[in-house]
Image: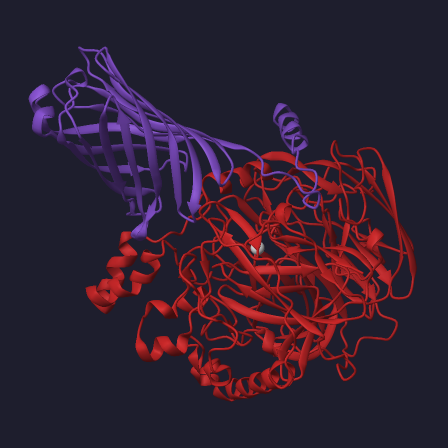
Amino acid sequence: MSTTKNQISRRVFVKGLAVASVLASTRINLNAKEVQKEFEKGDILSGKVFNLSIGYSAVDITGTPTIATTINGKLHAPTLIWKEGDDITINVTNNLREDSSIHWHGIIIPTDMDGVPGISFEGIKPGETFTYKFTVKQSGTYWYHSHSGFQEQTGVHGSIIIEPKVKDPYDYDVDYVVALSDWSDENPKSIYRKLKVAGNYYNIKQRTIGDFIDEIKKDGFINAFNKRKMWNEMDMGDRDLSDVTGYTYTYLMNGDNPATNWKALFKRGQKVRLRFINSSAMTFFDVRIPGLKMRVVAADGNNIHPVDIEEFRIGVAETYDVIVEPLENKAYAIFAQSLDRTGYAIGSLTYDENIAASIPKMDPLPILSMTDMGMDMSKMNMGGMKMDNMAVKNDKKPMDMNKKTPMANMKMDNMPTENKKKSMNMDMNKKSFMTNMSSSSMDKTIPITPLEHADGPQSTMKAANPQYRLDDPGVGLRNNGREVLRYSNLKSLRSTMHDKQPDREIILHLTGNMERYMWSINGIAYPDAKPLKFHYGERLRITYINDTMMNHPMHLHGMWQDVESGANQFVRKHTVIVQPGSKISVQVTVDAMGSWAYHCHLLYHMAGMFRKVVVA
Amino acid sequence: MKKILSATLLLSSITISSFAASAQSPLYEKLTIDSLETQNNKDKSISWSGNFWVGTELNKVYLYSEGEKPKHSSSSSENQLVFSHAISPYWDAQLGVEYDIDKGAHQTWGVVGFQGMLPYFIETRATILAGSGTLGLRLEAEYKALITQKLSLTPKISTALYSKDIPSMELGKGLSNITASLKLSYEITREFAPYIGVQWTKNYGNTNIFNPTDETYFVAGVKFWF
Ligand SMILES: [Cu+2]
């Protein structure tokens, strides 16, 4: 099957009927020992010149034929293989009836190549071709997607692999991309409208009377009622996990639906590198391969000190590279359940292309806790549930969140849901957290540049006491009996010895109102906000405070965010998950002149939770 | 093929071309029929209640209508046109006019209203009416309790009070009416739910003299929105 001419996707099949996917089509062979050229048929493009064509393709993901926006006719676009140091040219032709664009996610390039309409360029008009030219200055796993309208939701996303100049410091035999995405047959505009007029439209796992009766049986009426009290008083739900769910989404792995069950082949004893990319519009996935430990070797394209885990959460736009070593000849499930447990993407890591892994059971529905509301859990343990411990409605004055509380010891032991068995780990992390605090922000006060902030109907609550929760794997993963990746596990391999101390700090509150479906930063939505000014050459500390009950993956274009993930420990990322009710700090070396987009990567949050950054 | 064509049209109709190019909040609109039901009461009424709004997250224009048509007499209804402005995360303040019809008679009011969610997820609306030298107050509250994700039980209570008699409209001074209902509904889709229920309504004071009412009856109907 030739590719570029073919506007009809190969993925035409009936719901529930598995059709053999083009086997191992996304197998990449960089450092891999075997070369399997026969699999390269347009799913992978390499070289220095690339031609991409954005157009409409007929697809059938769910049993209902519909139209996707695709690149070169592929839902999940071709994987691009670049080489670090190469000067590359990419011609992108827009065959849609509306403007389009391609943004190279996480790639450090000049602003006019960044592909954000209205900020980096004017977008690509229908029928026109825009030529991107730049030098590749990094290596690792990345992705690319449209930055126009909702095209990302309807299929304009693909993977990027950049081969390093110096071999990665780990060995593997075979190499696969595992790109996760969320597909809906609904027009994304209609999804957006439904969220606007009925915010809980897609929440199909709301609290029922039965849940309350179960709690009464367990805790007695008074306790059960009191437990609900704070949520009820604030009109907040503890099951508001995702705005858009499996009610409309089918979750895909490399463009394949669960019935197709994408397959990656291995031979016993081989080391397999899996490059996970979350290219979905709205979905966080919890990923595991039952029966295998995963060694995480890179995050957002950057190599880290390897860490062995059994499960990780991947936020929208994040990437993780893992290495697994299947020792048995069998089929292992690559299982990526959505955070809200309304569905999953699945593939098989198998020794035989005809054998698929059996489907693991989904985990129970995660229930948000007061931690996720930004409460100070230490007070909760001692004094019970007092109003000033919890997130406050906006008409009440929040506690001073930066200084008032004794930071050092409140953190880890106040996470009641954390696994107490892992005390070694916890102690270490606690210590590291304390030292981190003292080294980076306590000894030396960093001047805070105040930013404009607005209160009002557009934001429902304030996290009264947001905590650094680097050790918190997140709602639904706490205490689940598995070794789950946390941000505190992530430490870049690159030396941070010569990184400057921050010159100043800004605080960004992530704000929103789920009921009205409004999202903003510091209470101000993008259309009403002034650009953020970064000074060329400075080292800027950014502290995020999440005043909502939802995870927001914050993506800064053009510059890295060095997340403070522990004591003198940083992890270099392009997309940073800010957990509900928490805070997290990053440091940015401001070394890229021009205008840049800076936003939450949830597609339907983006219109409001967005800033233009001007570096001058 | 037809389906594919229409899907193409749908996709191409996406007009937000860029998130970066700052756009005004788009206008949305929604028609909600909270109830359209037959009532097994002495009048054998058909009753309705609903609203239509157009606007943004913070500012909307609402058209409300609620009323009944007894089988053998003419209809009565309360119809409002209000401007609605968000004053807090969960509350809108409203200002506008109301036009009531009662079996041929009619009454125009100025309206100040508050609509929003009380703690414990209680949906509430309060309207103050002023017209013909009379003040009125209407209150309603409802709570939707989920039995399953699709099946729910909704208790609702509403009441009305007036500062003077308006005999033409059969409204009496003081507490005029209390109506309470309990409805069991099943969401076939998010947008469409049939229900059955029981409703009790009682008039008080002079209202009850103008129009004696104290009855309990079954109702059956649908609610829907789009
Ligand atoms: Cu967001």
Q: Quadrant of the C terminus of chain A?
A: bottom right
Q: How is the image coloured?
A: by chain
Visual hue assigned to chain B: purple
Q: Residue at position x 28%, y 47% from top?
A: B147
**B75 up-or-down from A169: above or below:** above
For the point 45% across and 74% down, the residue is A479
Find residue B140 and report its image quarter: top left
Q: Where is residue A449 in the image (x, y as percent from the top left)?
A: 65, 67
Indicate left or right for A536 with A529 as reference: right
- Is residue A119 at all visible to an observer of this figure? yes
- Count of all numbered marks drawn on residues in the image: 0
Front residue of A536 and B195: A536
* Nearer to the camera, A108 or B91: B91
**Observer-nearest of A312 and B11:** B11
Evaluate whether residue A336 shows in this view: no
In this picture, residue A598 sits left or right of residue A478 = right
| Quadrant showing the N terminus of chain A | top right
Could you tell whether A250 is left or right of B115 in the image? right
Residue B77 image point, x, y percent:
27, 20
Q: The red chain is which one?
A: A
| Percent of width and height locating residue A574 | 70, 64
Judging depth in this view, the residue of A194 and A215 nearest the camera is A194
